[in-house]
């Protein structure tokens, strides 16, 4: 049972890593100035839709942005706005 759960968790982590890589690939399309969380969400969803052709709801887009924040792709500044971090290429 534990091996099965470990395999599911590993698969889930790989999928999350792939999603972050996909967002990183479109960050050059995002505005460079700091953005509020809602603007960042909307910009990611809009560019994702244009590039990958997948329509996101606001909830789906926000979950993706939160994942990217957790993984360090977006950083929150002291002013409360988000910017794209300068991560090395993976």
Image (cartoon, rainbow, N blue to C red):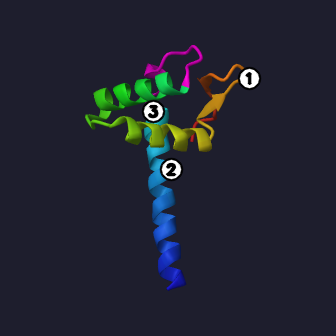
Sequence order check, earlier mark of 2 and 1: 2
Mark 2 → mark 3, Cα distance in angstroms: 12 Å
Q: Which mark is residue 78?
A: 1
- In the structure shown, which secondary structural element does the residue marked by tag 1 occupy? loop
Residue 50 seen anywhere in this rendered image of the structure: yes
Q: What residue is shown with label 3?
A: 25
**Residue beneath the point at 40% across and 40% down:** 59
Could you tell which of marks 3 and 1 lies nearer the N-terminus? Answer: 3
Residue 86: tell me if it is visible.
Answer: no
Instruction: Look at discs 2 and 1 and give the one toward the viewer.
Output: 1
Q: Is residue 66 magenta?
A: no
Magenta segment includes 35: yes
What residue is pinned by disc 2? 17
Alpha carbon separation for disc pair 3 and 1:
26 Å
Q: Which residues are magenta?
A: 26-36
Q: Which mark is residue 66?
A: none
Which is nearer the N-term, disc 2 or disc 3? Answer: 2
Q: Is residue 83 above or below residue 53?
A: above
State the predominant SS element of the stretch in magenta.
Answer: loop
Say whether residue 90 is left or right of residue 47.
Answer: right
Residue at 51% x, 66% y: name it.
Answer: 10
The residue carrying pointer 1 sits among few (fewer than 14), some (14 to 19) or many (20 or more) residues within 10 Å by Cα, namely few
How crowded is the residue under tag 3: few (<14 C-alpha within 10 Å), some, or many (20+)?
A: few
């Amino acid at each position: 049972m534990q091996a099965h759960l470990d395999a599911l968790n590993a698969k889930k982590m790989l999928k999350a890593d792939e999603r972050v890589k996909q967002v990183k690939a479109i960050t050059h399309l995002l505005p460079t100035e700091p953005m509020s969380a809602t603007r960042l969400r909307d910009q990611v969803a809009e560019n994702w839709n244009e590039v990958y052709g997948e329509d996101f709801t606001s909830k789906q887009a926000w979950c993706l942005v939160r994942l990217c924040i957790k993984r360090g792709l977006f950083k929150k500044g002291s002013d409360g706005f988000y910017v794209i971090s300068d991560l090395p290429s993976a």
